[in-house]
Amino acid sequence: MRTTRAQGLTLVELLVAMAIMGIIFMLITQWQVSTLNISTRSNAMSRSLGDLNDLSGYLGDRVRAAVRVRVATSGLSVNAGAGSACSADRPCLAVVLPEYSPSGVVSRYNLYVYRMMPRSAVTHPDDKVEDPWAEGQVQVLKEYRSEDSGSAPTHCVLGVGETFDTAAAPACATMRSLGSATAFSGLGSYLVADYLTPASSLGAGQVPFAYDSATRVITLAFQHRQQVRGQTTALPAAEPYTLQVQARNVP
């Protein structure tokens, strides 16, 4: 009677099996990395869209309520120091807004100036997250408020029986002539938005702020730019997100 002896795997078979397993593990790893990249970028794009919606809605509300508006790319500076002038690379939007008392009556008017500026110009560490790539690639939008001013113009406080058009205070006169003002100093500053495509890189004919005095319409245009897992993305990809708002209270 013949007996058979069980044989194990040969070295070649083991090597082939290990090679196949290595290929399978590599494919699984690549799939996981690809899935993680897609998920991370999708989440980043979702946050970018939310930031753009918040920014345009915030500025849109300001413009709708404004009694004076001005878009400046020259002839105006905000706070003293290097880079304080509004320019094509650092455009500004200035608005004068009423402030209401608890009883619903206008008690004073405040000046707000919005200026695009390089992210690297933001020096306070609490105002931005550390991101070396972003320093030379994006701009931020800063808000300057007269209500927190340490010098002129302070907010425009109305006297008894006065309106914005008749108020005698120097700050009121300055705000009424917003279009001819050349400098505002000592305004409190706040960071409104980060990771914005620089004003000079929005594309031909595109600017963050544009004002049509005939229709009193302000056009806002912004694009969000960031680097996610080594890839630079812009939202919207083709051209900036735009919003047209009428400054209905401007005479």
Image (spheres, helix red, strand yellow):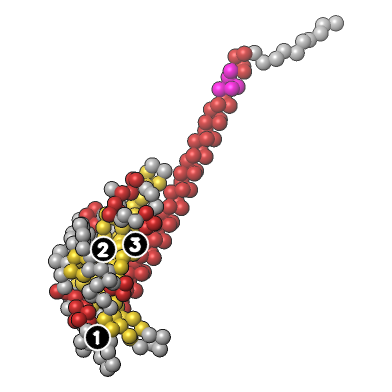
Q: Residue at x 22, y 74 (%)?
A: 152
> Image quadrant of residue 238?
bottom left
**Which residue corresponds to mark 2?**
115
- The amino acid at mark 1 is Phe
Q: Earlier in the sequence, mark 3 or mark 2?
A: 2
On screen, residue 46 versus residue 167, left or right, reads right
Q: Position of residue 9 (x, y in %)?
A: 67, 15
Q: Residue at x 23, y 65 (%)?
A: 79
**Which residue corresponds to mark 1?**
164
Is residue 103 visible in the rendered structure shown here? yes
Q: Earlier in the sequence, mark 2 or mark 1?
A: 2
Q: Residue at x 15, y 64 (%)?
A: 74
**Which residue corresponds to mark 3?**
191
Q: Which residues are magenta?
A: 15-19
Q: In which quadrant is the N terminus drawn? A: top right
On screen, residue 130 versus residue 76, left or right, reads right
Q: What is the distance, in whole Å, between disc 2 and disc 1 at their CAs?
A: 25 Å
Helix, strand or loop status at disc 3: strand
